[in-house]
Image: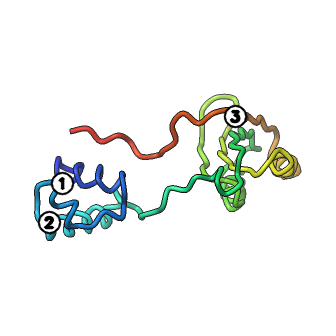
Amino acid sequence: MPDALDRKILRILMEDAHTPFREIAARAGTTVGTVHNRIKKLRESGIVKRFLPEIDASKLGFGICALIEMKIAGGHLSEVQQEMSKDPHIVAVYDVTGEMDTVFVGKFKDTPDLDRFVKGTLQHKHVKETRTRLVLNVVKEGFAPRLDD
């Protein structure tokens, strides 16, 4: 479990993963060597999986975000999730409780792009039903928890 120093380092990295170790050390009140070692341990433990740029999908032409719920035939959930997750539109996949089995979050260029994806999923032999919800406005988007001391 990360201690207070690890959480300080993580907060800085979550603001900008390209922050130089020297700056992280100064802001966290420690040494560059300690920052290096802590980040190495955070990566080895799997807390930090990878460093990725945060992309504004709408500026790349993906103006539609959709939540696509699916009911999947018994015993095929993982298979369908793995298959659908390979589609470049899909940015997140969740097992969920309730009537539907899984939710896919997808980014699409326009409604015809979304329509092709949804109609394609309905052709899948193990997809029994879909429900699609369009995101009207993104208030907050991020997948890391807030790290308080």
Q: Amino acid at mark 3?
A: Met
Q: Amino acid at mark 1?
A: Arg
Q: Nearer the viewer, mark 2 or mark 3?
A: 2
Q: Nearer the viewer, mark 1 or mark 3?
A: 1
Residue positioned 36% across, 65% down in the render: 18
Spatial CA distance of label 1 from label 2 is 13 Å
Q: Which mark is residue 27?
A: 1
Residue furthest out toward the left: 30
Spatial CA distance of label 1 from label 3 is 46 Å
Describe the element under mark 1 as helix, strand or loop.
helix
Q: Which mark is residue 34?
A: 2
Q: Which mark is residue 126?
A: none
Residue in the foreground of this view, choosing between 72 and 37: 37
Residue 117 x %, y %: 81, 51
Q: How crowded is the residue under tag 3: few (<14 C-alpha within 10 Å), some, or many (20+)?
A: some
Q: Residue 34: which quarter of the image?
A: bottom left
Can residue 109 be seen in the rendering of this structure? yes
In the picture of the structure, the residue carrying the numbered disc 3 is 100
Circle nearer the N terminus (1, 3): 1
Residue 129 x %, y %: 81, 38
Circle nearer the N terminus (1, 2): 1
Residue furthest out toward the top: 98
Describe the element under mark 3 as helix, strand or loop.
loop
Disc count in the image? Answer: 3
Q: How crowded is the residue under tag 1: few (<14 C-alpha within 10 Å), some, or many (20+)?
A: few
Residue positioned 70% across, 41% down in the render: 66
